[in-house]
Structures are given as C-alpha cells and as structure tokens.
Image (cartoon, helix red, strand yellow):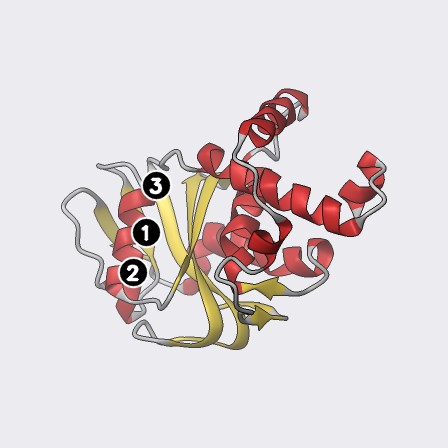
Amino acid sequence: MELQQALGVASYQTAWAWLHKLRREMAPLAERRLSGLVEVGAASIGGRAAVTGLKTRCGGLVALAVGVRGRRLGRARMEAIAAAKQKNLGAFVTSAVEARSTVRTGGSPGPRGLKNPRFRHVLAALPPDLLGVHRVAEQLSQWPSATLHGTVRATHLPGYLDGFAFRFNHRTARSPGPRFGWLLERAVRAEATPYRRLVRPGGQPDATWPKWRVCC
C-alpha cells in the first residue's frame, strides 16, 4: 500500500508485483557472511511456538544469525528451513558465517550438535544470553503484521526475509538514496517475471501462515 501511494500507481496488483521484484534484488546485498561472534537461533511462523531440535510443531521455521559486538548488533542473515535439525542449521551456518568465527547457540539438540572445524562453537548458559537472536526474532515477529497485513505465503517467504534483512542491515545508513538507486537499477535490468509466476510459482496455491511466533 505504501509503495502504491508513493509511486502513484493505480493498481495494487502492480505495486505488489514491483515490491516483490525489488525484494528479489535485495538478496545479493544480504549474502555477505557474518564474522566475529555470531549468535544463531530460530523463529517460528504460525502454529505452536515449540522447537524440539528434531522437528517443529510450527507452521514454518526461519534460521537466524546475527553478529554481536558487545551490546550492539551487527548484520543479520536469515533463511527458511524445514526443521531445527543439526543438518539444516549446519548448512545455514556454513553459508552465513565466515570461517574462524565464534558461533553461539542455545542448548536444544539441533543447535547443540553443530560440529564444524571451521568455527568455534559455544553454548549459551541461559536463553537470555542469546539476546541478539531474540531481539532480531522479536522484530521479525512484529514485521508481518506491520508490513504484510499479517499473512505470509510459503513461496514468498524467502523474498520477505530478504526484504527484512535488507532493512535491518541498513538501519543505520545515513541516506537510503544510493542503495535504493542501485536496487532499482538491478530490478529494471532483471528478467521480466509475469504476475502469475509471482503469485503461484509452481502453478498451485501454497500454505499461508497468519501468525509469527518466536521460538529461539
């Protein structure tokens, strides 16, 4: 709705399609790996907020990683995952964190079992010790209701996460102008994507998750 008003576009459908195309171009800006001390956890989307480390009773899961510098947060990375298993989280950490960094996680079975000689893995003594992950997850849980009218489709989740990470990682930028100009140029040069492919990439309707909950 905000983009529709800002651009003066008569059709909400056109504005929605443009916004999704912009989100797709945000992904490269969010792909730089994190380094130093990095906290890793997960947030749930819909369903019951419960993670066992082996499976989840939630509608969906998002793996989160955030750089921590004392009491200040750095950049964040996030990715939709099927379950909070060691394999899923391990692959995410490998793609999101630089080698020789320190990865701090909670004590549930999935995160606790992370074993990779590339990183130094430490366990948080208590859940409050993962303040960075909890702060990002809390903002992420509030974002759909404020920005997406409370509903998230499974096929659109990666794009929404790219959009959130883009905003979070550039929250301290003095001027959004240069970044937005670069983003708009990439979107214009990108391959055209019809609206029907944006709505239903596989040709079939998919799951919707009306509520987000934190389950780090």
Crowding at dot 3, Cα within 10 Å, few <14 / some 14-19 / many 20+, comes out as: many
Residue type, label 2? Asn
Give the secondary structure at mark 1.
helix
Residue type, label 3? Leu
Residue type, label 1? Phe
> Marks 1 and 2, how far apart in space?
6 Å
Name the spot of residue 94 as percent of width and height, x first.
26, 46
* Quarter of the rendering occupied by the C terminus: bottom left
> Marks 3 and 1, how far apart in space?
16 Å
Give the secondary structure at mark 2.
helix
Crowding at dot 2, Cα within 10 Å, few <14 / some 14-19 / many 20+, comes out as: some
Mark toward the viewer: 3 or 2 = 2
Residue in the picture at 46% in, 43% down: 76
Using the image as rendered, state which of residue 210 and residue 20 is in the foreground. 20
Please name the residue that numbered disc 1 is placed on: 92
Residue 88 is labelled as 2
- Quick check: 116 left or right of 23? left
Q: Earlier in the sequence, mark 3 or mark 1?
A: 3
Q: Is residue 168 above or below residue 41?
A: above
Name the spot of residue 209 as percent of width and height, x first.
58, 70
Residue in the picture at 21% in, 44% down: 119
Using the image as rendered, state which of residue 10 and residue 55 is in the foreground. 10
Residue in the picture at 34% in, 41% down: 37
Name the spot of residue 59 as percent of width and height, x first.
50, 73
Q: Earlier in the sequence, mark 3 or mark 2?
A: 3
Q: Is residue 175 visible?
A: no
> Marks 3 and 2, how far apart in space?
20 Å
Q: Is residue 83 visible?
A: yes
Circles 1 and 2: CB atoms closer than 8 Å: yes
- Quick check: 16 left or right of 94? right
Please name the residue that numbered disc 3 is placed on: 37
Residue 77 is labelled as none
